Amino acid sequence: MKWIATALLLGSIPAFGACGGPPGSLESLAKAHDWRHDKGEALNLAFLHEARRILQPMSHQDAIKALQKAGYDCTLGPAAANQPESAVLCMRATTAHACQMGWEVFSTAHSGHLMEVDASFTRSCRNAADSWPIKLARS
């Protein structure tokens, strides 16, 4: 929690919504930031940490249900010998004001418990300067 307070003071993570506290669900996380205008790097970092905080205490099945309830489409990957439970990739996308925004959550489990949660945010805009990550033109 100390890193969140420090990051907020330094301005590297956008502030939370009107209530002032961290979002308690994926639905409230979707409303906690100005995904269209805030800095992409800070949004990506905030989404990663907040998604992990929300999902980590859940079982894998409950995490998948929570993601689906929040509008994510989830795809189960094949199980492997060293990972008998499937990995899951959940994605959600929306378009607003000449930008396409996407949120992805990847998770793995063991014995029904989440082992790994990775999350990322992307924004692709007509004005390339608003996109995240910023794509550099090749010469």
Image (cartoon, grey):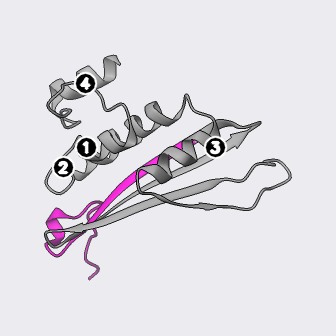
Which residue in the structure is indicated by mark 1?
42
* Residue furthest to the right: 81
* Marks 3 and 2 in Cβ contact (< 8 Å): no
**Mark 1 and mark 4: Cα distance apart in space:** 17 Å
Q: CA distance from mark 2 to mark 4?
A: 20 Å
* Image quadrant assignment for residue 136: bottom left
Q: Is residue 29 left or right of residue 76?
A: left
- Report the residue at 41% width, 50% height from top: 70
Boundaries of the magenta span: 117-139
Residue 33 is situated, as x and y percent measured from the top left of the image, at: 21, 44
Residue 116 percent location from the top left of the image: 60, 40
| Residue at the spot of label 3 | 61
Q: Residue furthest top?
A: 2
Q: Quadrant of the N terminus?
A: top left
Depth check, front residue: 70 or 57: 70
SS label for mark 3: helix
Q: Residue at x 45, y 33 (%)?
A: 54
Residue holding disc 2: 39
N-terminal of the pair, mark 2 or mark 4, is 4
Q: Quadrant of the rendered structure where residue 122 is?
A: bottom left
Which residue does the image show at 29% across and 25% down from the upper left? 4
For label 4, the residue is 21
Crowd rating for badge 1 (residues with CA inside 10 Å; few <14, some 14–19, many 20+): some
> Closer to the N terminus: mark 3 or mark 4?
4
